[in-house]
Amino acid sequence: MCGIVGYIGARQAVEVIMDGLSRLEYRGYDSAGVAVNDGREIVIEKKKGRLQLLEEELKVKPLCGCMGIGHTRWATHGEPSDANSHPHSDETCSLAVVHNGIIENYLEIKSELKKNGVVFKSETDTEVVSHLIDFYYSGDLLDAVYKTLERVRGAYALGVIHKDRPDVLIAARKDSPLVIGVGEGENFIASDIPALLKYTKNVYLLEDGDVAVLTRDTIEVYDLQRKKVSKELTEITWDLESATKGGYPHFMIKEIYEQPHGIKETITRRLDENGLVRFDDIKLTREDLAEIESIYIVACGTAYHAGMVGRKAIEKIARIKVETDISSEFRYDTPFIDEKTLVILVSQSGETLDTLAALREAKKRGARTLAITNVMGSSIAREAEHVIYTWAGPEISVASTKAYTTQITCLFMLALDMAFKKDVLDLESYRTLLEKLKEVPEKIEAVIENEPQVRQIADKLVNVEHGFFIGRGMDYCIALEGSLKMKEISYVHTEAFAAGELKHGTIALIEPGTPVIALATQQNLFEKSISNIKEVKARGAYVIGITVEGNTLIEQVADDVLYVPRVDDLFAGLVGVVYLQLLAYHVSAMKGLDVDKPRNLAKSVTVE
């Protein structure tokens, strides 16, 4: 959440910063601002609302200067407002600061500063940083930043500029992502790579405790002990076009359409010359697996739903007991983990703070750790013992689609690898399941071809306020994700339930016209699912059934039916969920909502 862009070079800073911020809008925000050093003073302009409002203000009040910082804010401390927007300054506006994260001891510091006569202009935690830097500043900006970092507790990605130093931009990072873009005669900072791709593909990935000093021609990075550290230059392999809409009306629909390619890439990049799964970045041998007594899959939101599918996959294929837990609960639940436990952390961004905290708790208790993420060099990827990268490509829409399905694909492949190494599957059975997984991309393409039918059904849901998703077994996991998609982008209150639980209370909410999306893709549970559909249909529900081709019996109990191409039960949900993504997308689009930037949400959640 929140976006940071900083620039120092020969270009007009505002143009670079605003362009970069526009490419970070997917992260979620409710205000935006920029600060520029014009060679004499720091000039700040910031506005509540969308970036367009700030752009219009800058046309009236242009800011000139070749060094500056910008920010899109997602409100945590203090309501969305001009005053609470970043950048923040000291009382004389001699410096400006942008910040992602949370300063946990800001009230203590704020009280102290107030006693010294400092007057605050906002309700934010960030403003204490700008005043602290000013308090410690005596001509050495880097020294003032270091002394400030010694005082604050919490998470931060910081960009700092000062009127006395038009040649220096300072950045610092702890528990909140920040990268440095390396150019020729110009350098950049940003909270995510898409902001930089127009200008450079060469980046330094800052790590916790890094403090960077940027000039036009140099970049120096130090640790918290003020010792200089060397950084490895990373070249970004995807281009700007991958992070643009490419003719689609929204990123979300583009990313839904990209799923067959992403899943295919995720599979084929991991096959060796014998056609077997090979994970180059993990070293779990037969002996290692023999020592593992339990597995936890820990994640948040959509990634947690992927983990639920992964749990069933590992248990069914590899016959290993698995627990799933929500990251924000995991470290407070005193989980039973030790050196004989494998903890799998799933995160699209690799920066999800709750998941990162769970990872650190697992390591502290001696557990083995494995990350599944879409972002190379992210915090979770770097700190985990092992990492599996999905190959989804950049995902821009706040509502995750292709990251989710590629996460599930990785978990299926991990289950196959574990099963084979533990001799649970013989080579023939292993190859058979792997071949069926390789069929998933073309099955999803067939689902996408049915988009016109999904659009017709979506038209019937545009004005509904409540609905339910039901399923059994693997379908229940998929129902949870479908419900979340409908809530987060269409603002329709929906709940997902294991279908057999309806009669234990929830069915009291079913009344004539209530939409129920019923998943019934599991052949061994199909008849049971039909019975559950009859229960809601008898109370007047409008039922949308999703099942596998050939299960035409469902047409007798459902009002509309969407068919998934014939596929193994294990992978039917992975294919069928695309219908739920399309359904949520079209309901949102028909309502005229901001599909890619749903209210109150952020792409990367870097606060607890």
Image (cartoon, grey):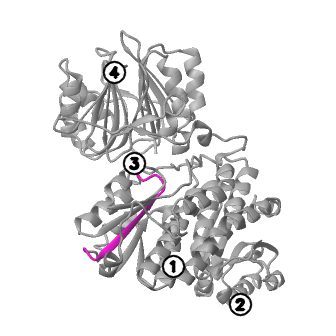
Residue type beneath disc 3: Gly
**Which residue in the protein does label 1 denote?**
312
Q: Give the answer, above or below, for where 492 lies relative to 240.
A: below
Chain-order first, disc 2 or disc 1: 1
Chain-order first, disc 3 or disc 1: 1
Left or right: residue 173 compared with residue 235: left
Left or right: residue 523 compared with residue 126: right
Q: Secondary structure at mark 3?
A: loop
Chain-order first, disc 3 or disc 4: 4
Q: Secondary structure at mark 2?
A: helix
Q: Range of the magenta residues? A: 339-351
Q: Secondary structure at mark 4?
A: loop
Residue type beneath disc 2: Glu
Chain-order first, disc 1 or disc 4: 4
Around disc 4, counting alpha carbons within 10 Å, would you say few (fewer than 14), some (14 to 19), or many (20 or more)? Answer: many
Seen at 64% across and 56% down, the residue is 261
- Nearest-to-viewer mark from 3 and 2: 3
Relative depth, front residue between 403 and 147: 403
Q: So how many labels did they put on this image?
A: 4
What's the distance in space between the residues labelled 3 and 2, CA to CA? 47 Å
Can residue 346 be found in the magenta stretch?
yes
- Nearest-to-viewer mark from 2 and 4: 4
Q: Give the answer, above or below, for where 429 lies relative to 124.
A: below
Q: Secondary structure at mark 1?
A: helix
Left or right: residue 35 compared with residue 238: left
Around disc 2, counting alpha carbons within 10 Å, would you say few (fewer than 14), some (14 to 19), or many (20 or more)? Answer: some
- Nearest-to-viewer mark from 2 and 1: 1
Residue 310 shows in the view:
yes
**Which residue in the protein does label 3 denote?**
377
Indicate which disc residue 11 carries.
Answer: none
